[in-house]
Image (cartoon, rainbow, N blue to C red):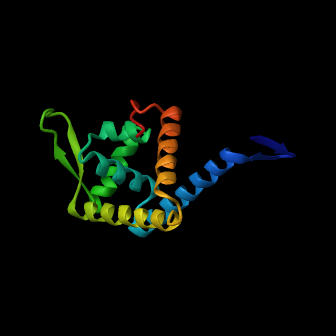
């Protein structure tokens, strides 16, 4: 549902709810990044490395939809902050892998625990069946928007 009133654009119904939810997630991500002492992009990079375990800078750049130069700058700041490290690639002497340091691992554990706890609070009155249905809907919608074979996830 889209409407325009003068110069203002407005969504209604489910699209409006989805936008409000995305903005709430962005706001939460910004708060978490600030508390962790990193930027939003650095938090995204930490999350992607945490999910992969280890990842090449090119793979990280592709998953973040950034240039390798931008990811190099981000990873350098995270390496300097002792949250990430560069290690030799075991199969390619010309490449390297990015991994979390023990400090980076602790930061991600704390972030994921806090996120999980926050969602538990806001869904405390939601049945398990409704949560399962919502999870299915979110995954399905995400896959329709960006197929899972892409490197965005």
Q: Nearer the viewer, residue 50 or 141?
A: 141
Say which residue appears at 76% left-offset and 40% top-offset.
2
Which residue is at the front of the view, 152 or 130? 130
- Relative to 55, residue 22 above or below: below
Where is residue 48 drawn, in percent x and y? 35, 48
Q: Quadrant of the N terminus?
A: top right
Q: Quadrant of the C terminus?
A: top left
- Above or below residue 121? Residue 142 is above
One can see residue 116 in this view = yes
When the figure is inspected, residue 21 is found, relative to residue 153, above or below; the finding is below
Residue 82 in sight: no
Quick check: 63 left or right of 94?
A: right
- Residue at 26%, 40% (x, y): give it: 56
For the point 57% across and 58% down, the residue is: 24
- Residue at the right extreme, as displayed: 6
Percent position of residue 3, x then y: 80, 42
């Amino acid at each position: 549902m889209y409407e325009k009133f003068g110069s203002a654009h407005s969504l209604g119904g489910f699209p409006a709810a989805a936008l409000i939810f995305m903005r709430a997630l962005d706001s939460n991500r910004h708060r978490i990044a600030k508390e962790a002492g990193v930027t939003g992009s650095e938090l995204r990079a930490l999350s992607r490395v945490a999910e992969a375990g280890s990842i090449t800078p090119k793979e990280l750049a592709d998953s973040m939809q950034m240039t390798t130069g931008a990811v190099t700058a981000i990873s350098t700041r995270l390496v300097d902050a002792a949250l990430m490290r560069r290690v030799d690639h075991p199969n390619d002497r010309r490449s390297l892998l990015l991994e979390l340091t023990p400090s980076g691992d602790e930061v991600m554990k704390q972030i994921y625990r806090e996120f999980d706890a926050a969602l538990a609070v806001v869904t405390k009155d939601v049945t398990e069946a409704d949560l399962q249905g919502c999870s299915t809907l979110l995954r399905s919608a995400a896959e329709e928007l960006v197929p899972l074979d892409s490197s965005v996830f």
